[in-house]
Amino acid sequence: MSIDYRFSVAPMMGYTTPYARYFYRLLSKKAVLFTEMVASQALVRGNQNILCQKNDLENPVILQVGGNDEKDMAKCSNIAEKYNYDGINLNIGCPSKKVLKGRFGACLMQEPIKVSQMVKSIKRESSLEISIKCRTGVDDKDNYDFLKNFIALTSEAGCKVFFVHARKAHLKGLSPKQNRTIPKLEYEKVYKLKNDFPHLKIILNGGINNLNNFNEHYSNLDGIMMGRAIQKNPFILLDVDKKIFKINETDKKNKIKIINNYFIFIQNYIGKISSYHLISPLLAMYFGAPNSKSLKQKINDYIITKNFEKLEKICIDSFS
Ligand SMILES: Cc1cc2nc3c(=O)[nH]c(=O)nc-3n(C[C@H](O)[C@H](O)[C@H](O)COP(=O)(O)O)c2cc1C
């Protein structure tokens, strides 16, 4: 079944864990979710049960992989199928030093033939939908024709879905965090891609902080992807099904019930998984609030002592 890409939550290392994805799914039935990036080498040679951990309730969910070896990629697509992911996404946008050293991520935008080979090899091996997440350019290769050529070659190889983080990546001199804020946003290039490749699915990512302008984006594109805004306030997802997917919820979702369900879910993991990881999908909302110093201290204490009853109470009290 093909995936409805109108709204996705961006892959975020350290955040889009199986626990966060479960929480996000409680808030939206339809948003497409992504894993954190997994290195293809680690996936092929490491502990797949840990790296691919997911709950079937999370679907639709896409496994994001980073790598540059076509044989490994083929194996990754088999693994993604085995663990019931809905799609596999190639990370061609990460500018971190570690990723650059491994010669994958954003630097591969300069090697569209290599990326095309990976696409072909995945397509030969599995029927999973394949997508690419890329930038608008890298370093001084930042004109529209560079981007257009990358999309043309990789789409000819069989990739029909592109998530474009609408900023170029600086491979030297900027940290990943700076690479998400300093390069200017170039939405017009992403719009132009859809114009030039109307048969492809083009999804816009970068700097979208709310659902206000979604109509404007949809008149030009196939979907939007939001990252940090959801990490800071996952409750934005409560509006996604109704506003974007036009699903009328008969049972009005209740924030307290959702928090309740999430704490029931994580009970099985207490003591096995770091308490911080389990509570992290909710943390940014409280840590970001003004005058939150004493609240933060309390939350930290409860995390250390694994007092999940008190943690749940704090979350629920904030809505009453
Ligand atoms: C903490 C953090 C981790 C990220 N990890 C990944 C990742 O694993 N894979 C990836 O493709 N992008 C990653 N990104 C980039 C996001 O997917 C997204 O492209 C970027 O944050 C811009 O979207 P936004 O402005 O909506 O946040 C990460 C971003 C953040 C903030």
Image (tube, rainbow, N blue to C red):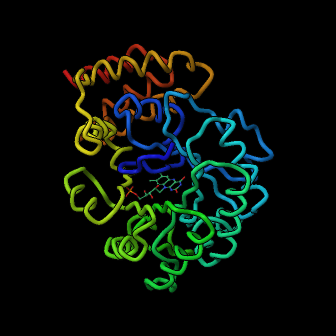
Residue 199 position in % (x across, y down): 44, 66
Vertical order, 196 against 73 (above or below): below
In the image: residue 209, left or right of residue 42: left
Quadrant of the rendered structure where residue 203 is?
bottom left
Q: Which residue is drawn at 51% across and 24% down?
A: 304
Vertical order, 136 against 279 (above or below): below
Q: Which of 49 and 283 is in front in this view?
A: 49
Q: Residue at x 57, y 63 (%)?
A: 159
Vertical order, 19 against 182 (above or below): above
For the image, the number of numbered tags is: 0
In the image: residue 196, left or right of residue 254: right
Residue 168 position in % (x across, y down): 45, 74
Q: Nearer the viewer, residue 159 or 243?
A: 159
Q: Which residue is drawn at 50% across and 71% down?
A: 174
Vertical order, 260 against 33 (above or below): above
Quadrant of the rendered structure where residue 110 is?
bottom right
Q: Nearer the viewer, residue 317 or 223?
A: 223
In the image: residue 187, left or right of residue 15: left
Residue 59 position in % (x across, y down): 50, 35
Quadrant of the rendered structure where residue 280 is?
top left
Q: Quadrant of the C terminus?
A: top left
Residue 150 position in % (x across, y down): 55, 76
